Amino acid sequence: MAKKKNSSARLALIGLVVAALGCLGTATFGIIRGSEALGLYTPARPESLIQGLAISGGVLLVGLAVYGILNPAGVRRFFAGRQARYGSNALIMSLAFVGILIVVNWLAIQYPKKFDLSEGKQHTLAPETLQALETLPGKVVAKAFFSSQYPATTARSLLNDFKSSSKGKFDFEFVDPNADPVQARQYGITGDGKIVLTMGDAREIAAYADENTLTQAMIRLISPESRVVYFLTGHGEAELQASDSSSMLRARQTLESKNYTVEELNLAATNSVPADAKAVVIAGATDPLLEQEVALLKAYIKNGGSLVLLTDPSLLAEPIEVDDPLASYLQQEWAITLQDTVVIDLTSNQPFSAISASYSSTAPITSRTTSFTIMPQARSLGITASLPQDVTVTPLILTAQQSWGETDLAALQANQDVAFDENADVPGPLTVAASAENAASQGRVVVFGNSVFATDEGFDAYANGEIFINAVDWAAQESDLINITPRTQVDRQFNPPSQVGFILILLTSVFILPGLVLVAGISGWLARRRQG
């Protein structure tokens, strides 16, 4: 009889151990599930968490039931004896802990929130990506082709971010190309780790699971047709290749990432503007255009074409013996005057670099710009009060009141000190960029009083590149693409510590801190032993 009693007690003890393991598993899965809902952790298989939570909860109940059946006397003693007081406290604490877990999980599911503490918010979708998701004309479904041998944790987390920020416009699924080769061939997938975005009959492949690549693929879905932008050559303009920091390589690469085709155009050689030109860009010409070239541009714009002009002060260009026909055209047809000045901005650490003090809040080019623009050695623009018929002109970028347009270029060329002359200079605030549109012809013009800000030297500084790309988007009448230029990822390198630093880290983490804990434990043990 005693033997049977001991056997039942041992089995009851096993049931109690099983219940403890079930309780531990329930708490662990609950914490992980809450971390997932908060966006702090993304498991490879989210559905396994629900299964684990259910199984561990079941194990907890089964263990308690086994213990209660095999040791009813112990249960009665627990609730009736002195241990009940202590046991009830532990029970209340346990129930409170489980209750907190349930409430936290529910709140996290109902109000999901992700915290990104990294510099530059590298784990938060960029405003440009959010704008692209908002602009989607239809629902996009992403098929991520990842085999079991290829890590998919980062891709799943990123796609989850896209989905949660899309307001139902973005969804995804994972496909194992090894298990389903037919579907992989159907979507043209020949390798691992690629993502296919589909919207209706349109389809784009993202070769990598990163935000920039996915955003670029979405942009191609939004506007899949061919778009060609021509950069004028033959007048000393900035080059499109990376010869030095004065080139327009970064601008070209960014335009190409938005599905533009960037070509060069020599009007003197072709004697025409190509029919597929969405916009023509003149970037920092040092020689004036010929009359016949301006006539070609004028006819092109009159038929709904667009021009983006980046012009520098005459101080930086070749001396012009005759009137500039392009400047005359802008003044007569668009009411924009290229003032023969150099902007002096006293709010800048470098007075010859004009800083944007305000933007137009109504123009699509600048309405969402939050950072400032820096234009080294800029010229000011004038806008005529009486506008030509059907023409609307908008000042895009204004400098501060503490700036002026210096007209004594000879003094500047001789490196002489200059000061504001109210009788000769142009008082601030100054317009350094303006856009214009003809409602009848649909022709558009954007004029900047500087070209350096859009070259490789200044493109990635503050809002410089954003403003230029927005100007091209607006000129090309691609309003859906404005403000959704993929952001440039910041390359970060880990610099390992020196040998001395590494030794100090090793001593601290392996010997000093554990040693302090060990000494504290031994000291406490000896103190209790002395006290008996």
Image (tube, rainbow, N blue to C red):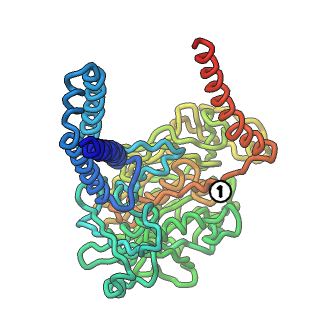
**Amino acid type, mark 1:** Glu
Q: Quadrant of residue 92?
A: top left
Question: Which quadrant holds the N terminus?
Answer: top left
Instruction: Point out residue 311 in the picture as x, y percentages from the top left corner.
Output: 57, 58
Q: Quadrant of residue 248?
A: bottom right
Which residue is most to the front?
A: 1
* Residue 224 visible within the image: no
Question: Which quadrant holds the C terminus?
Answer: top right
Residue that appears at 39% across and 70% down: 217
Crowding at mark 1 (Cα within 10 Å: few <14, some 14-19, many 20+): some
Instruction: Point out residue 301 in the picture as x, y percentages from the top left corner.
Output: 40, 69
**Frontmost residue, 12 versus 408:** 12
Q: Is residue 20 above or below residue 438?
A: above
Instruction: Point out residue 439 in the picture as x, y percentages from the top left corner.
Output: 29, 60
- Which residue is denoted by mark 1 in the rendering? 457
**Frontmost residue, 517 versus 291:** 517
Q: Is residue 128 above or below residue 97?
A: below
Residue that appears at 79% across and 45% down: 414
* Residue 466 visible within the image: yes
Number of numbered discs on residues: 1
Q: Secondary structure at mark 1?
A: loop
Q: Is residue 359 above or below residue 171?
A: above
Instruction: Point out residue 54 in the picture as x, y percentages from the top left corner.
Output: 24, 52
Residue that appears at 20% across and 33% down: 73
Q: Is residue 441 above or below residue 131?
A: below
Residue that appears at 25% across and 46% down: 4
**Frontmost residue, 460 versus 178:** 178
